[in-house]
Amino acid sequence: MDCYTANWNPLGDSAFYRKYELYSMDWDLKEELRDCLVAAAPYGGPIALLRNPGRKEKPASARPVLEIYSASGVPLASLLWKSGPMVSLGWSAEEELLCVQEDGVVLVYGLHGDFRRHFSMGNEVLQNRVLDARIFHTEFGSGVAILTGAHRFTLSANVGDLKLRRMPEVPGLQSAPSCWTTMCQDRVAHILLAVGPDLYLLDHAACSAVEKLCEFNCNIRAPPKQMVWCSRPRSKERAVVVAWERRLMVVGDAPEGIQFVLDEDSYLVPELDGVRIFSRSTHEFLHEVPVASEEIFKIASMAPGALLLEAQKEYEKESQKADEYLREIQELGQLPQAVQQCIEAAGHEHWPDMQKSLLRAASFGKCFLDRFPPDSFVRMCQDLRVLNAIRDYHIGIPLTYSQYKQLTIQVLLDRLVLRRLYPLAIQICEYLRLPEVQGVSRILAHWACYKVQQKDVSDEDVARAINQKLGDTPGVSYSDIAARAYGCGRTELAIKLLEYEPRSGEQVPLLLKMKRSKLALSKAIESGDTDLVFTVLLHLKNELNRGDFFMTLRNQPMALSLYRQFCKHQELETLKDLYNQDDNHQELGSFHVRASYAAEERIEGRVAALQTAADAFYKAKNEFAAKATEDQMRLLRLQRRLEDELGGRFLDLSVHDTVTTLILSGQNKRAEQLARDFRIPDKRLWWLKLTALADLEDWEELEKFSKSKKSPIGYLPFVEICMKQHNKYEAKKYASRVGPEQKVKALLLVGDVAQAADVAIEHRNEAEMSLVLSHCTGATDGATADKIQRARAQVQKK
């Protein structure tokens, strides 16, 4: 216990701080950190270095080198800086490196030195130049704050959605402030700065003085190089770490601070729960000792966790003291608390040996509890295994347990993927049993997107390797990978990868983007999705000239059919061109027939369109359609003459309706002439005339018509049509003229049941007798019914 707390340093009466080594740096720096621009990302992130030309003389021909390392000093990228003079470096929340130049241009690079984009902080910054800059993080994203040569501040709270804000002037600021920083409060970015002995807080509207809460005299005349906050999450105690050339001091609301002597020039990186301190040779972590660790390990502690840890150690020695310690904890009812303290303390330990010791103690205590839930213990074992894996020197992500929980496993996996540590990321997913879509599938997709960028490998080999690794893994989109390949200039590789994409809806848009429209059309047709085919067709129509477009359609019958359907509703002239190009005279004739009704209003134009249609039908050797079209032309001309001579509406009536209209107009001779001209059969003409005269109730003309010659339709229709018009008197005239085979039906229609019965009995027709019998109702027809029944009986006997 005494050895373990040897590096604990008290700050006042309520907090201890400890500093331990994370890594021994082996990055072979040729420059002192004070001669470089330095930026380190939080959450155990990477370190960027660029020698500052303003601090040390160097040959005019030499260019500075921008280098990126992991937190353990493993090189990640190196590039020659060829742009303008740089003022400041900083990392975004997505671990992109933001390089702020003197002219206000900010260049953005990836973790591996790949250029992403750039943006400008505005004309005012360009004119006055940049004196200093800060990269800061808010809930909106990563921001940039600029101090210009005019001693004014300009900032953007989110570089992803650049909106520049000019901050108010600071009274008395005639030169660069001795110290300033950025902060976010109430969803608003602020600037806190010192002007002489005074502190000011800038927001978008005003500059206000800040009240001083406490004061600490460090007795060092030289101004500090850095000053950062250092406290554990949700802790009431607030401490500040101040760094000079060879000294480090932790100060807070206490009379005495904690001092550390530094062997080398160092750089501070503020973290959620402490401060990282790195130099040319070491990388350390300074933080407030967590409550659980303090209660267990402080000297003479009687906390439940401390007693349980001692009990487990005595148990390993096979000493009876283990039982004494356990009884003491159990008598106080604090065994569950002791187990939980050991689990929590294990999470805050950096060294695996101490983690194991605390977890063994927790496991030992659980054995004496009946219903202690194992979830927290199992989860802590999993989390520590993940943390120990990423803390390895070759990985170089020294996350603490608190940082890990704040960052979340998904973001950690993203950062492993960003570092191209795909095997480790997959192992973590499998170990934690994450869903494939969130874990392994997503990582494999990122791996494939990186794989397509390896231009020294052939397209066939890359496509084969990706398919062998991914197969049909759920959640993986080959189209996304193909899009990345196309973005890298590897079009043929993108096409090969799209062959593995099962969803045509994902294949086609990328093929269109790659100018492979004909292949896209084939894929769309294979899918059977008509909407997708229409999308490609419209794209082809805009991309190709008219001839090539039609030729492409000719080779794809399904696409041609669909496009014709589209043209029928949207582009009739294009449809006509399609029929002309294909010499499809039959469809061309049908097109002109429709056009004569849809487009033309003048009779001359309609007749001309029909003539064109008839010519097309003759070319198609469809004589029936051609003759029918010519008949329609004659009918239209005749209808126009009838309208001119008789008035009324004849145009666009059928031949039958035209005849009927003429009869209703009293033009019987013209109706008969029209029937002869268009070869209307006699039976049809008699029906038309019979119906029309009955509608007119012209019974005299109807009777004359019936006697004009022998009716080709018989006289039963005359009976029926008269009864339909409720004229029984006229109906009886024709009932007597009906032939024997329909006589019974005619007599029944006019209501003469008795005579119908006599005719049926005379014909000895059982069906007719049954029909008459069905019409016998009431007492009046009783005698008739009996007569029929006797007649039926005689017929049946024979």
Image (cartoon, rainbow, N blue to C red):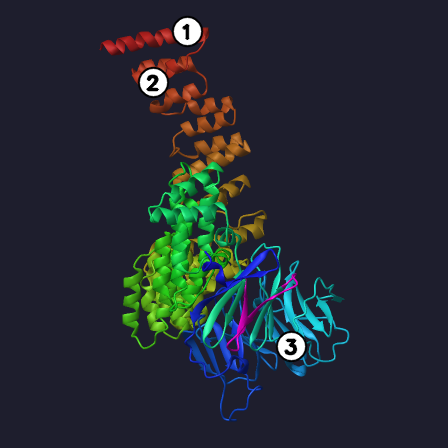
Decide: is 79 above or below 167. below
> Which three-letter amino acid code belongs to the residue tagged 2?
Glu
Q: Which mark is residue 782?
A: 1
> Which three-letter amino acid code belongs to the residue tagged 1?
Gly
Ranked by sequence position, the earlier of labels 3 and 1 is: 3
Badge 3 density bin: few <14, some 14–19, many ≥20, Cα 10 Å: few
Ranked by sequence position, the earlier of labels 1 and 2 is: 2
Badge 1 density bin: few <14, some 14–19, many ≥20, Cα 10 Å: few
Q: Which residues are magenta?
A: 252-272
Q: Mark 3 touching mark 2, by CB under 8 A?
A: no
Q: Which mark is residue 212?
A: none
Decide: is 90 above or below 354. below
Q: Is residue 204 visible?
A: yes
- Is 101 displayed left or right of 548 in the figure? right
Q: Position of residue 270 (x, y in %)?
A: 55, 66
Q: Position of residue 582 (x, y in %)?
A: 35, 66
Q: Which mark is residue 768?
A: 2
- What residue is shown at x 37% (from left), y 13% (from top)? 773
- What residue is shown at x 31% (from left), y 9% (from top)? 791
As rendered, which of 161 and 173 lies closer to the eye? 173
Q: Position of residue 509 (x, y in %)?
A: 42, 64
Q: Quarter of the image holding residue 534? A: bottom left
Badge 2 density bin: few <14, some 14–19, many ≥20, Cα 10 Å: many
In the rendered view of the protein, which quadrant contains the N terminus? bottom left
Q: CA distance from mark 1 to mark 2?
A: 17 Å
For mark 2, give the secondary structure: helix
Q: Which residue is mark 3?
A: 223
In magenta segment, residue 652: no
Decide: is 695 above or below 220. above
Q: Is residue 206 visible?
A: no
For mark 1, give the secondary structure: helix
Q: Position of residue 535 (x, y in %)?
A: 43, 61
